[in-house]
Amino acid sequence: MLALEAIVSALSFISLALFLGQIVTAGFLLPGGDPRTFRASLVHGGLISLSAFLGIALIALFLQGAKIQRAIPSLELLWRYLTMTQSGHVWLGREAYGAALTLIVWAFVKRANGLKAVQTLALLALPLVASRSLMSHAAAVREGAAIAIAADALHSIATALWAGGLIALCRIIASLVSLLSASH
């Protein structure tokens, strides 16, 4: 069970890193003018990554319930976990924020807004990535918990920006190589 929980946790972080990396790349690294198709592609990829995060979080909730009940969790147990524990409250908050952010990104994709809107999406993504720290080992520190959580949150954001940004940049390079190949 522990290995499965670790895999689901890693997939959750990877999906958020891909989301943040694509949105930040689209909003801050691409020039403001012509690469609208690249920007739109990255934002659409971000939407897919964010949707994956929401689905993975449901799997994580099921695994948490299975760990507590040592069997397939009942709806009553899951409800008690969500409403009576700190990690359940954080899970609910993250899912609600992630769902709201998904709707915002989806609306953005439908309207094809400009560069400032993508930058706003990137800033709105930061609390979702940082909220992971509220369920980390940093939250268990007795003295100086706020500092530990803040440091862990900054580390999570930096890691997600680096890893997700690398993947986004690889997507852009692959697209450019493809365009150059097609023109020759």
Image: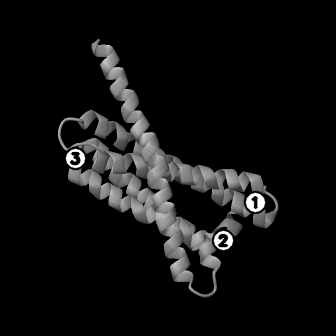
Q: Residue furthest bottom?
A: 143
**In this view, 69 is above or below 150:** above
Give the quarter of the figure containing the C terminus.
top left
Asked whether residue 155 appears in the rendered view, the answer is yes
Q: Which comes before the other along the chain, label 2 or label 1?
A: 1
Q: Residue at x 65, y 52 (%)?
A: 8
Q: Residue at x 56, y 85 (%)?
A: 144
Q: Which comes before the other along the chain, label 3 or label 1?
A: 1
Q: Residue at x 67, y 66 (%)?
A: 78
- Seen from the viewer's position, the closer of residues 180 and 83 is 180
Give the image quarter of residue 48: top left
- Seen from the viewer's position, the closer of residues 160 and 103 is 160
Q: Which mark is residue 81?
A: 2
Q: What amino acid type should be assigned to the residue bearing mark 1?
A: Ala
**Residue to which mark 1 is pinned:** 66
Distance between the alpha carbons at the discs numbered 3 and 2: 39 Å
**Residue to which mark 3 is pinned:** 113
Horizontal and vertical percent for residue 59? Answer: 64, 53
Q: What amino acid type should be assigned to the residue bearing mark 3?
A: Asn
Give the quarter of the figure containing the N terminus.
bottom right
Q: Residue at x 19, y 44 (%)?
A: 32
